[in-house]
Amino acid sequence: MRLRTAHGAAAAIGADVVLEDEPLDEKPHAPAGGAVPLATGRDERGRVASTEAARALAKLPRRTAFRPRNIPVAEAFQYHYRERLAWLDHRVKEITAVTGACSAGVTMRLRRAAWAYAWSEYADTLAAGAADLDRAEQAARLAEKADKLDWSAWTMACREGQARDSRGTDDDLADQRRAQADFQRRLAARQEGSK
């Protein structure tokens, strides 16, 4: 989703901006090589191969930083709660493997998505047991909310991965600064010549 300048019916009613879903070709993709430190940073015995790989691995978030809290759960919800924890763990690992990291903001959205999935499955179970259409519709709404939260977490992780990739190495930054300084000098000379 993205804020865009209002057009069509939204502009006709006086809206300045609208929140729209991006076309498929504009949706963010996982950054290329985001998980490289994990894939190529270890030798065949699983040990860290270089100091650069060790630094990259050290910058990744720790699994213990995102452990769910231990809360009492009703017996009827136990299965769905365990599934929620398993899904959350799997999804965090999946996003970390593809984008290179899973920030606290991404993980928080995934936690909310995991709860929505668990509650939707629980509501589906209750609806099926009682043939309750209203509860089934409630489950569908919860599942839709979970999908949106999961998608927003994925989008955020991809954008964070692209931002990490765009920062580059210190050598890249030094080259960029030199190029910027050179451009500023040429621009200043051009402006002096036009006076």
Image (cartoon, helix red, strand yellow):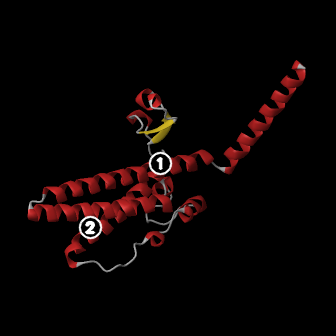
Q: Is residue 132 left or right of residue 94?
A: left
Residue farthest front in this picture: 13
* Residue 103 visible from this viewpoint: no
Along the line of sight, the residue nearer the viewer: 165 or 15: 15
Along the line of sight, the residue nearer the viewer: 168 or 85: 85
* Residue 71 visible from this viewpoint: yes
Task: Find residue 87 and report its horizontal and vertical position in percent.
Answer: 31, 63
Label 2 vs 1, first from the N-terminus:
2
Vertical arrangement, residue 188 with respect to residue 40, above or below: above
Residue 75, by quadrant, is bottom left
Task: Find residue 8 and report its horizontal and vertical position in percent.
Answer: 43, 27
Q: Is residue 101 left or right of residue 182?
A: left
Badge 1 element = helix
Count residues near mark 2 (Cα–Cα under 10 Å), then give few for <14, some for 14-19, many for 20+: some
Task: Find residue 159 and report its horizontal and vertical position in percent.
Answer: 50, 47
Q: Quadrant of the N terminus?
A: top left
Residue denoted by label 2: 83
Vertical arrangement, residue 109 with respect to residue 18, above or below: below
Q: Residue at x 28, y 60 (%)?
A: 117
Residue denoted by label 1: 158
Q: Is residue 36 left or right of residue 9?
A: right
Alpha-carbon distance for marks 2 and 1?
Answer: 25 Å
Task: Find residue 192 and report its horizontal and vertical position in percent.
Answer: 89, 24
Q: Residue at x 46, y 58 (%)?
A: 106
Q: Residue at x 37, y 54 (%)?
A: 150
Dot 1 amino acid type: Cys
Q: Residue at x 45, y 46 (%)?
A: 30
